[in-house]
Image (cartoon, grey):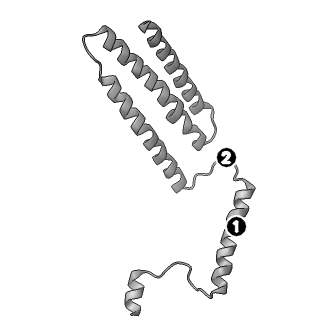
Amino acid sequence: MLDYLISFLILTGAIFTFIGSLGLARLQDFYTRLHGPTKATTLGVGCLLIASSVYFSAYAAGLSLHEILITIFLFITAPVSAHMLAKAALHVELRSLVEIPEEKVIEDDAKKSEVTEVAEQADIKEVNPPSAEKVKTDA
């Protein structure tokens, strides 16, 4: 029965890893390519490591914690690295192939125009509050 569980985990891990790698190779955009290694491949490698841990715990002399620690480390670091890569891409203004929906653009433009109209009505020269140094020098 344990052999079936290990076989299931290995096959599941191999399928997830293959799908994640295929997504990394086939998808065209940086943002969509980011999902391949962070989602599917993480699950695939996690299944393989759990299968390895179950195998060595059952057939070796004791509990195998190395694979469990690697799995925990993988599940903690993969989302963080994906987040950092996405933030870096946004920082350098890397464009996506996916177009922004028109409704969102219209809503953003409407909000900007409302803020501008309110500022003009209140005769506000600066939308941003003055800095602390400017306030100290004026006083």
Which of 106 and 84 lies nearest the eye of the viewer? Answer: 106
Q: Is residue 46 left or right of residue 18?
A: left
For label 1, count other residues whose C-alpha is less than 10 Å away and answer few (under 14), some (14-19) or many (20+).
few
Which quadrant is the C terminus positioned in? bottom left
What secondary structure is found at the residue carrying circle 2? Answer: loop
| Residue displayed at 52% across by 78% down | 128
For label 2, count other residues whose C-alpha is less than 10 Å away and answer few (under 14), some (14-19) or many (20+).
few
Give the x, y percent position of residue 136.
37, 88
Q: Which residue is mark 2?
A: 97
| Residue displayed at 47% across by 17% down | 9
Give the x, y percent position of residue 125.
58, 86
Question: In the rendered image of this protein, does residue 3 appear above or below residue 117?
Answer: above
Residue type at mark 1 is Asp
Question: In the rendered image of this protein, does residue 111 appear above or below residue 66?
Answer: below
| Residue displayed at 52% across by 34% down | 39
Q: Which residue is mark 1?
A: 109
Mark 2 or mark 1: which is in front?
Answer: 1
Question: In the rendered image of this protein, does residue 79 appear above or below residue 92?
Answer: above
Q: Residue 88 got which mark?
A: none
What secondary structure is found at the residue carrying circle 1? Answer: helix
| Residue displayed at 42% across by 8% down | 2
Q: Are marks 2 and 1 in contact (CB under 8 Å)?
A: no
